[in-house]
Amino acid sequence: MDFMETTTTHNPDAAASQERHDLGGRIVRSEGVRGGKPRIAGHRITVSDIAVWHERMAMSPDEIVSEHPGILLSDVYAALAYYHDNRGDVDREIRESEESIHHIRAGAPSLLDELRSGKADVTNNPVSPR
């Protein structure tokens, strides 16, 4: 269910010339900002960020605001309302992001994994002790 309407933004600093607004303008989509994902207006925090923090990490709306003081409590509730109205789409977006991260990690082992396996080259590592 997508009830976003398209409006033109007059902000010259905006990454895109069009934003799609919902829930009183609190949730927007902008091409070129966070991949066009729905986010809190004026911020890079997406609805999926809020959903993960609240649903999976069991953070309360107050805790989310305290961790991200630039957003308002009403912004968090707007993001949660959008999430519940569009749960299937947002959950799919979260899954796709997780799959992308997994794919990237699978192709590039961490330094810790390389150290454990003895494959890491620490001779030119500026962080290694000398």
Image (cartoon, helix red, strand yellow):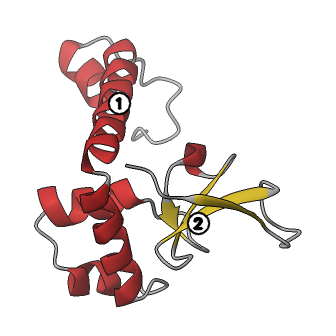
- Residue located beneath label 1 in the image: 96
- Residue located beneath label 2 in the image: 21
Q: How many marks?
A: 2
Rendering quarter of residue 49: bottom left
- For label 2, the SS is strand
Taking the spot 59% from the left edge, 66% from the top edge, the residue there is 21
Instruction: Report the side of 86 relative to 40 (left or right).
Output: left
Instruction: Report the side of 6 relative to 26 (left or right).
Output: right
User: Badge 1 local density, few (<14 within 10 Å), some, or many (20+)?
Assistant: few
Instruction: Report the side of 23 relative to 16 (left or right).
Output: left
Taking the spot 23% from the left edge, 81% from the top edge, the residue there is 61
Q: Is residue 15 above or below residue 105?
A: below
**Mark 2 is on which residue type?**
His
Q: Nearer the viewer, residue 106 or 18?
A: 18
Taking the spot 52% from the left edge, 79% from the top edge, the residue there is 24
Residue 14: % across, % down:
78, 64
Res. 68 in view: no
Rendering quarter of residue 18: bottom right
Q: Is residue 45 above or below residue 121?
A: below
Residue 106: % across, % down:
31, 16
**Mark 1 is on which residue type?**
Glu
- For label 1, the SS is helix
C-alpha gap between disc 2 and disc 1: 23 Å
Q: In the rendered view of the protein, which quadrant contains the C terminus?
A: top left
Res. 69 in view: yes
User: Badge 2 local density, few (<14 within 10 Å), some, or many (20+)?
Assistant: many
Q: Residue 78 — which label?
A: none
Instruction: Report the side of 125 relative to 13 (left or right).
Output: left
Taking the spot 24% from the left edge, 56% from the top edge, the residue there is 52
Rendering quarter of residue 92: top left
> Do residues under tags 2 and 1 come within 8 Å of each other at their CB atoms?
no
Name which of mark 2 and mark 1 comes first in the sequence: 2
